Amino acid sequence: RKEVEQDPGPFNVPEGATVAFNCTYSNSASQSFFWYRQDCRKEPKLLMSVYSSGNEDGRFTAQLNRASQYISLLIRDSKLSDSATYLCVVNRWRLTGGGNKLTFGTGTQLKVEL
Amino acid sequence: NAGVTQTPKFQVLKTGQSMTLQCAQDMNHEYMSWYRQDPGMGLRLIHYSVGAGITDQGEVPNGYNVSRSTTEDFPLRLLSAAPSQTSVYFCASKNRDMNTEAFFGQGTRLTVV
C-alpha cells in the first residue's frame, strides 16, 4: 500500500463549480500535511498547509481527519487558472538518519472548463 | 532571492554517458533532496541530505550518487546513464521545522537515448 494515496483524476469541472479532492495516508506517525500545486511542466509549489482545526485561504479550504487518516481540499468557484495537478504531501520524522521525511501523493489533475 | 537553482533545464544523454545535475539554494536550509517524477509515479526520492557532509539514500538511489560538501550545494551524479533514467528531476530544500514548506528548483528534463 502506498504511504499517500490520491485519486489521479482528471476532474473536469465547469468554471464556477465546487470541487473536492481527498487524500489518504497510511502512517499514523505523520505530523504535518500540505497541499502543493503543480502546473504542467513546472515545479511543485506550496498551495497551503493543512491544520488539525481546518483552514481556509480564499476559495480554498483544507481539512485534516487524523482518526481516519485523510486530508481534503475544497475549491469553491473554480477558475480556469485553477487547472493544475494537486499533490497531497505528508511529513514525519525519519526513524533512522534524522530529518523530515516528505512523502508525495501522485497528484490529482483538475481541468476547469468554460 | 534566487531560492533553489537547478541546472541544466534540459539534457539529452547517450546511454553510458555520465553527467552531474547541479542544485544550489541560498536559504541556508539544512535539508536538500533529489526527486524524479515519472508519469503515474509521482515524485520519488532519490537521495537526500540533512546537512553538509551527510547524505543518505531514498527510494530509488540506484545509478545515482550525491555529495554535500557545503550547505548550499547538492549535486546529483548519473554514473552511467540508462534509458530508464529518462525523467524529470527536481531538487528541493527545506529547513528542519516540521511545519515548513519545501522549495523546489525548476526541474531538469533528462532524456537518455
Image (spheres, coloured by chain):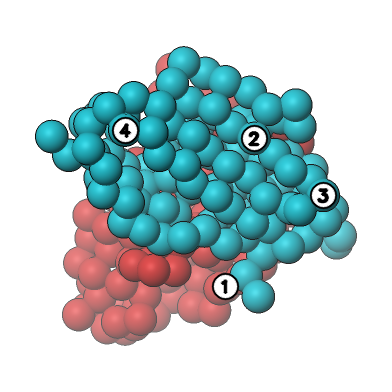
Amino acid carrying mark 2 in the image: Gln
Q: For the residue labelled by badge 4, is the local secondary structure a helix, a strand or a loop?
A: loop
**Residue nearest the viewer, comparing A87 with B10:** A87
Quadrant housing residue A17: top left
Task: Tell me the number on the disc at residue A17.
Answer: 4
Callout 2: 10 Å neighbours few (<14), some, many (20+)? many
The percent position of residue A108, horizontal first and vertical second, equals 41, 53
The percent position of residue A32, horizontal first and vertical second, equals 73, 39
CA–CA distance in space, label 2 to label 4 = 19 Å
Dot 4: chain letter: A
**Residue nearest the viewer, comparing B23 with A46:** A46
Dot 1: chain letter: B
- Decide which of tag 4 and tag 3 comes sooner along the chain: 4
Name the residue that disc number 1 marks. Answer: B61
Quadrant housing residue B71: top right
Q: Residue at x 40, y 39 (%)?
A: A19
Q: Residue at x 66, y 64 (%)?
A: A3
**Pointers 4 and 3 in contact (C-beta within 8 Å):** no
The percent position of residue A94, horizontal first and vertical second, equals 81, 56
CA–CA distance in space, label 4 to label 1 = 42 Å
Task: Tell me the number on the disc at residue A67.
Answer: 3
What color was chain B assigned in the picture? Answer: red
Amino acid carrying mark 3 in the image: Ala
Is any atom of residue A10 visible in this view? Answer: yes
CA–CA distance in space, label 4 to label 3 = 29 Å
CA–CA distance in space, label 3 to label 1 = 34 Å
**Residue nearest the viewer, comparing A111 with A17:** A17
Circle 2 or circle 1, nearest the eye: 2
Name the residue that disc number 2 marks. Answer: A63
Whether marks 3 and 2 lie on the same chain: yes
